[in-house]
Image: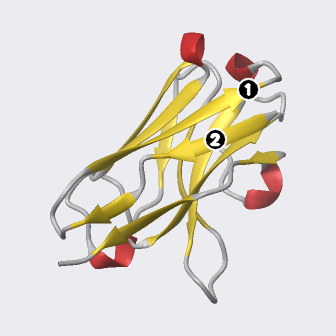
Amino acid sequence: VQLQASGGGLVQPGGSLRLSCVASGGTFRDYTMGWFRQVPGKEREYVAAITWGGGRTCYADSVKGRATISRVNAENTVYLQMSDLKPEDTAVYYCAASTKEYSACYYWPKDYAYWGQGTLVTVSS
């Protein structure tokens, strides 16, 4: 499974953006998909997850109310829409796929088998 993330860039505080992640190979509809982020010197941080059927979405407290994760299985794509961006949202954002059989949100990087290359989001005026 290969994951290709895109959509990062420079955004002003209070702005919005949408990240995309396209999967190839594997069976996308069977994977819980997650978004994580990482800044230099810190551990990778969970942002959001969506179960393989799309029936459940979960968010980190730091982005709850400002982020929406969604997926289009027919297009093998997962999205992360973020609004009211803050400087502390600056990070490299990674999408990831979990092959665990149980359909649930997974919060730990170790629960994800496949990772995209990351896309940089910079929130600054």
Tell me the quadrant of the picture where the N terminus can be found.
top right
Q: From the viewer's perspective, is residue 110 above or below residue 124?
A: above
Foreground pick, 89 / 106:
89
Q: Which residue occupies 29% across, 77% down? A: 87
Residue 40: tell me if it is visible. yes
Q: Position of residue 90 (x, y in %)?
A: 40, 73
Coloring basis for residues: secondary structure
Q: Which residue occupies 83% across, 35% down? A: 100
Q: What mark, if any, has residue 4 been given in the picture? A: 2
Q: Amino acid at mark 2?
A: Gln
Q: Position of residue 118 (x, y in %)?
A: 60, 57
Element carrying mark 2: strand
Precedes in sequence: disc 2 or disc 1: 2
Q: Position of residue 29 (x, y in %)?
A: 68, 18
Tell me the quadrant of the picture where the C terminus can be found.
bottom left
Q: Which residue occupies 55% across, 27% down? A: 77
List the residue tagged with mark 1: 24
In the picture, residue 34 is in which quadrant?
top right
In the image, 31: left or right of 34?
right
Specify the farthest residue to the top. 74
Quick check: marks 2 and 1 in contact, CB under 8 Å? yes
Q: What mark, if any, has residue 40 been given in the picture? A: none
Q: Amino acid at mark 1?
A: Ser
In the image, 101: left or right of 37?
right
Q: From the viewer's perspective, is residue 55 above or below residue 120?
A: above
